Image: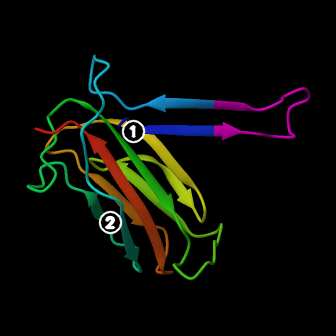
Amino acid sequence: MATTATVTLSSDIFSGFSGYSKTMTMYKDGSLVDIDSSTGFSKRKLASTTKVDLITMANELVEPLDNTGAKVYIKHTGNGKGVFDKSVGVTVLINSVEIGVLYGGDWLLMPVAVVDAEDIEVKPGSDATVVLEYVMFYEEG
């Protein structure tokens, strides 16, 4: 069974833009073989501005193959009680290099090169409680 992701965009900003929808099947690098592993769907509650590892690439439980094209999904689900505060951001980093900031309700799906020393980290911009949901799809090592 394949792992797929679908993104649909709609906007009234662009005149004549009727929308956009794309589906991507997640394959192992350089093949048409379905990606075979994931970290499992997880949630993490944060309530301080301390940077933490969300996904540790060298983690014994993950064991992805190095230098493969994994995919990671992260969503800022608000405070865990249904409140999506757009002023509360969480910075997403890889090996301490900033990728971007997710505000309440924002999410990302992006490819990542798996390297043992380059963890996926997050750093809330305030002490307000935020809950992140996340999963990484990867090739088993």
Locate residue 97 relative to residue 110 in the image: left or right: left
Using the numbered discs, state the Cα–Cα distance from disc 1 to disc 2 in whole angstroms: 30 Å
In this rendering, the answer to whether 91 lies above or below 4 is below
Q: Is residue 18 magenta?
A: yes
Q: Position of residue 129 (x, y in %)?
A: 48, 80
| Front residue (pair 63, 119) | 63
Instruction: Give the mark nearer the N terminus: 1 vs 2.
Output: 1
Q: Bounds of the magenta span? A: 8-21
Label 1, on which residue?
3
Principal secondary structure, stretch drawn in magenta: loop
Q: Position of residue 88 (x, y in %)?
A: 57, 70
> Of helix, strand and loop, which one carries label 1?
loop
In this rendering, the answer to whether 24 lies above or below 32 is below
| Front residue (pair 32, 139) | 32
Label 2, on which residue?
51
> Of helix, strand and loop, which one carries label 2?
loop
Amino acid type, label 2: Lys
Classify 10 Å Cα crowding around label 2: few (below 14), some (14-19), many (20 and above).
some
Residue at 51%, 80% (x, y): give it: 128
Q: Is residue 111 magenta?
A: no
Q: Please name the colour scheme applied to the rendered image.
A: rainbow
Q: Position of residue 80 (x, y in %)?
A: 51, 79
Locate residue 74 relative to residue 136 in the image: left or right: right
Residue at 24%, 50% (x, y): give it: 119
Amino acid type, label 1: Thr
Q: Position of residue 117 (x, y in %)?
A: 15, 45
Residue at 53%, 53% (x, y): give it: 107
The part of the image, by quadrant, that contains residue 45 is bottom left
Residue at 51%, 63% (x, y): give it: 76
The part of the image, by quadrant, that contains residue 133 is bottom left
